[in-house]
Amino acid sequence: MATASLRIDLDAILSNWRALDALSGPQTESGAVVKADSYSLGAARVAPVLARAGCRKFFVACAEEGADIRQAVGETPEIYIFGGHAAGDSDMIGDLNLIPLLNSPEQLNRHFEALPGKPFGIQLDTGMNRLGFEADDWFKAAPAVLHAGPKLIMSHLFCADTPEHPANLAQLTEFRRMTEGMNVPRSLAATGGILLGKDYHFDVTRPGMGMYGGLPFAEAKPVVTLTLPVLQVRDVHPGETVGYSAAWTAEVPSRVATVAAGYADGLSRRLGNAAQVWFGDVPCPVIGRISMDLITVDITHLDDTPREFDLLGPRQGVDAVGEVIGTIGYEVMTSLGHRYERHYVGGAS
């Protein structure tokens, strides 16, 4: 079976990172979020490009991801762990000089006992109720924490993609209240927060999805192109059905292309009878059910017989596909499977 191809433009990632970096002033440093294998695009290829361009702070979800990034970028950059210092991770954190963003009194005690003197940061809960010290616990712990010298104090905005939402200002106010006067670098803004303006930038920003070409950074350059090869084209007569459960029926004489990709490649079954793929500048409807390895496409309106289609690319990004199936571009991006033949372009400097 032919294999679908995923093209990843490293120069576009770098350009997006630089564009987001330019939105904050010279007093603000831009890090990079490379968790989930750089949103499934390959952190081992993405992170070194950013490091060569001057990125010195990388953010991951867990210690295991931190180990992969350390191998990719070398000993100098700082690697922060959003999940903090989990039980059993002390050796990995200490040996690789990773920086856990401690989220609770329990993690604080664990880190101070297991790795005294080793670097750490703090994550605060300013209203998201997910990870981070709540205010009462933080103010009790702050004297000892500040004496130990945290590398960073951060929190996370939960409505930054809706600029007018009152939660943004409420979180900004709470973050200031919890950190004012503390001589420690601060970080509040990921991509959405960067776009909210300088009040949210503080000392370090954390570009993520916008760097990879997705919303809320509408001006981002496209990063991924997902090309699906055609395996077979057939004529379908009126009244005949296509695919599992007879989910599509031809109403007129039709031509149907079967292409190599499916839900085993991370493509949602909700794309069936809803999405479109592109042959050059021409959209073609996806018809019938998405199966494990195959998708069917109506090409009746085409004069030519395609050899391949683009599902993702400049004409249709991850956010557009996400909208079709009732999800967000983040989920589409991070679901991209490992069976694709991956091609990296750019990233030489």
Image (tube, rainbow, N blue to C red):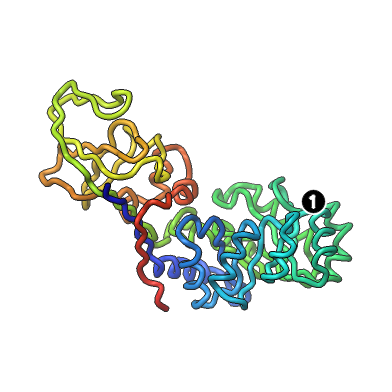
Residue drawn at point x = 71 percent, y = 61 percent: 101
- Residue 155, given in percent of the width and then of the height, sits at 69, 57
Q: Is residue 109 above or below residue 272?
A: below
Of 285 and 77, nearer the camera is: 77
Q: Is residue 198 visible?
A: no
x%, y% of residue 191? 54, 59
- Tell me which residue sits at (66%, 55%) in the image: 156
Q: In the rendered image of this protein, does residue 260 appear above or below residue 122?
A: above
Could you tell me which residue is drawn at 39 percent across and 39 percent down? 324
Picture quadrant where residue 11 is located: bottom left
Q: Nearer the viewer, residue 98 or 285?
A: 98
Image-based side of 24 in relation to 8, left or right: right
Disc 1 marks a residue whose amino acid type is Glu
342 above or below 269? below
| Residue 149 locus on image (x, y percent) | 80, 72
Badge 1, how many Cα within 10 Å: few under 14, some, many 20+?
A: some
Quadrant, the C terminus: bottom left
Q: Residue 70 sits in which quadrant?
A: bottom right
For the question of whether residue 347 can be seen, the reply is yes
Q: Is residue 36 left or right of residue 27?
A: left
Q: Quadrant of residue 271?
A: top left
Residue under the image location 84 percent in, 59 percent down: 109
Residue topped by disc 1 = 134
